[in-house]
Amino acid sequence: MPFSLATWNINSVRLREPIVQKLLQEEGPDILCLQECKSPVEKIPLEGFAALGYTHMIGRGQKGYNGVAILSRLPIEDIGDKDFADLGHARHVAGRLENGVVIHNFYVPAGGDVPDREQNEKFGQKLDYLTDMRDWFRAEKPEKSILVGDLNIAPREDDVWDHKKLLKVVSHTPVEVEHFAEVMDAGNWSDVTRADIPEGRLYSWWSYRAKDWDAADKGRRLDHVWATPDIRHAAHSSRILRDARGWEKPSDHAPVFATFDL
């Protein structure tokens, strides 16, 4: 069963309902995983999404912050969530498709501005969150699984606009990249996007602070699609919809796509 999937940090699903609908209408992924929904689940505007064929939804939400949701044209079973680092945040939800594929949707903490856990509690929380992810995947090896989301780390030198300048900037520091790699190794995850697009600079986030984000192009690849070894070879057609960053009232993230033939 082939299906297409997209992941997108939407930065408020209610505020940006029009561009979510635009994506669903124009691109038509079978599954759309959203992060930073900033809404209780019961207030996510499902009626418009359902009218476009996305009649299935699982999610975890909270008022004004965090929040993850999976919109699907395919039946999907809610199989729970994990509260990594005991933060009490809505940052993870998992669902199972009828073909047995498990989809994990993550929103890893951003980590604040100072890359030092002693000076910045949020940075410590980010590292602890990643450590808990690592330990979980070591203890319960994922199978036939896809992990997507805003992981808030750009791991490779060509995942950022300037590697040297960002080495001390949260999202690209060596300690974060090391934690990121440990999570990948713990679950034997493969980077689907880079398997399809192995070379060249690739970004999924551009700051709101840039007067002209497109011309400045100071991006980072913070949003990821991973797969377990048993299905990674079924993945293809990865892409980042850069144009969405320029839509009306945009998120600062662009959607990342992949297709799986299973």
Image: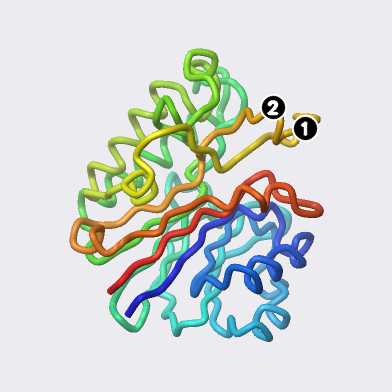
Residue appearing at x 21%, y 49% in the figure:
188
Residue appearing at x 49%, y 37% in the figure:
202
The x, y position of residue 221, in whole percent, is: 50, 38
| CA neighbours of label 2 inside 10 A, class few (<14), some (14 to 19), many (20+) | few
- For the residue pair 256 and 41, the one nearer the viewer reads as 256
* Left/right of residue 91 with respect to residue 140 in the rendered view: right
Amino acid identity at mark 2 = Ala
In the rendered view, tell whether residue 34 sits above or below residue 181. below
- For the residue pair 222 and 143, the one nearer the viewer reads as 222
Rounded to the nearest angstrom, the CA distance separating label 2 from label 1 is 6 Å
Amino acid identity at mark 1 = Asp
The x, y position of residue 174, in whole percent, is: 39, 21
Which quadrant does the C terminus fall into?
A: bottom left
The x, y position of residue 63, in whole percent, is: 71, 59
In the rendered view, tell whether residue 38 sits above or below residue 41. above
Which residue in the protein does label 1 denote? 212
